[in-house]
Amino acid sequence: MTVNVSGTASLPHQLASHPGTAALLVDDAGRYLLHLRDANKPIWRPGHWGLLGGGTEPGEPCDQAIARELMEEAGLTIPGLVPFLTVETFDLAGALVDQVLVYLGTLNRPAHEIPLHEGIQLRWTHAAETAHLTMDPGTAAVIAAHQAAPHPRRDATGRLPVVRVREPGTHRERSVVGAHLVLIQDGTVLLGKRHPDSAYAPSTWHVPAGHREAGESAMACVVREAAEETGLIITESDLTLVHTVDLLGPTSPVPRLQLFFAASRWQGKPAVLEPDRCTQWRFWPLTALPDPTVDYTRTALDGISRGTAYTAMGWD
C-alpha cells in the first residue's frame, strides 16, 4: 500500500457525483471501531477490516448518506459527526477509482452491544493493532492521518485534507519510467525553463526529458526527446546511465523511476522546438542551479556531482 497525504479536498457538495462515505468512530481510550466486511462476496474489500459507511444514493447529500448507512449497518445514531478528510483511491495506472468522504465522531459503547446488520464483526482497535489485521488500505491511511492530526481542519477556502491511496496490486507493481538527458560542458548543465502554462512544474527549470513510449527503451526515449525538444542529435552509444531517482511523488500514487543519462557527444546547438512546453534552453553551473529547479532533477544533479548512482525520494 502506498499512502500520500497532500493537497485538499473540496467541500462535500463538490465531491464526485456519487462519492462514498465512512465514519471514523473513536472512543475515549483512543481506539477505532473497525468493521470486518463479508468475505467471498462481490463487494468492496471483501474480508477486510474497514470503517462503517457506504455510497451515496442519487441526489443524497453526504451528511444524510452517512447517517443512513450507520443506522442500516449498525443501528447507530452518532451526534456531532463532522467531515474529517477525503480518501481518493487510484488504480495502478493512476486512474481515480473511488472517493470517500470520511466523518469523525465519538462513540463509547462495547462492540458486542452494537447490533451489526451487515458484515461479520465489529471491534474496537488501537492503531498499533491494525498492522496485524487484513486492513482496507483506505482505512489504514485514515487512521494514520488521524494519528498524525486528530482534529478536523480546513484550509482558508474551507477545503478538507485529502488522503490518496493506491490499489494493492495482485501482480507485480509497475512504475512509470522517465528518461532524462544530462548535457554537461565545462562544469555547466543544460536546463530548459518550462512554459508558465505547463501542467507539470510551470516556470521551473528541468533537463530535457520525457516518458518512454510503448516498445521504446529508455535510451531510445532520450534520443527521441532530445531531438524533439532541442534539435540535438545524440546516439545511444554515447549515452551512459549516471543516476536513478526512485520517486514516489506527493501528487501521484504511482511510483516513478527517473533515469538520467549523460551524453559524451552530441551534434547541434539547443533550440526551442516546443515553445508550448519550454521557453528557453540555457547552460547553468552545476554549483549554482537556477531557482526553481524541479526537485528530483536538482537531487539527481547533486548525486551526479557527488558520484552517487541512486536516490530514493518520497518513500518515508
Image (cartoon, helix red, strand yellow):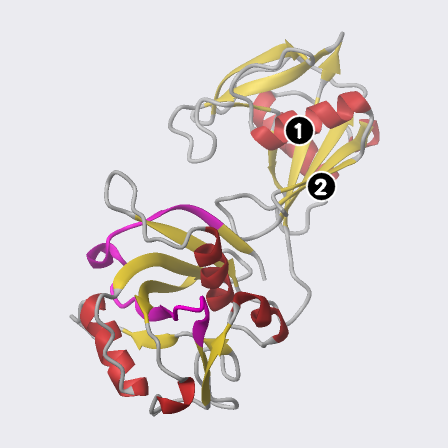
Depth check, front residue: 302 or 223:
302
> Element at badge 2?
helix
Quadrant for residue 101, please give it: bottom left
Which residue occupies the foreground of this view, 74 or 278? 74
Nearer-N-terminus badge (1/2): 2
Residue 121, image x, y percentages: 46, 88
* Residue that label 2 marks: 218
Q: Nearer the viewer, residue 164 or 185?
A: 164
Indicate whether 29 appears above or below 181.
below
Task: Give the position of the N terminus as an image quadrant.
Answer: bottom right
Task: Please indicate whether residue 109 sits to the left or right of residue 148 in the image.
Answer: left
Disc 1 and disc 2: Cα gap in Å? 20 Å
* Residue lying at the far top of the rendered structure: 186
Q: Nearer the viewer, mark 1 or mark 2?
A: 1
Q: Amino acid at mark 2?
A: Ala
Q: Which mark is residue 215?
A: none
Residue type indicated by callout 1: Thr
Task: Tell me the SS state at disc 1.
Answer: helix
**Residue range highlighted in magenta:** 5-33
- Check residue 299 in the rendering and tell me which mark sits there, or answer none: 1
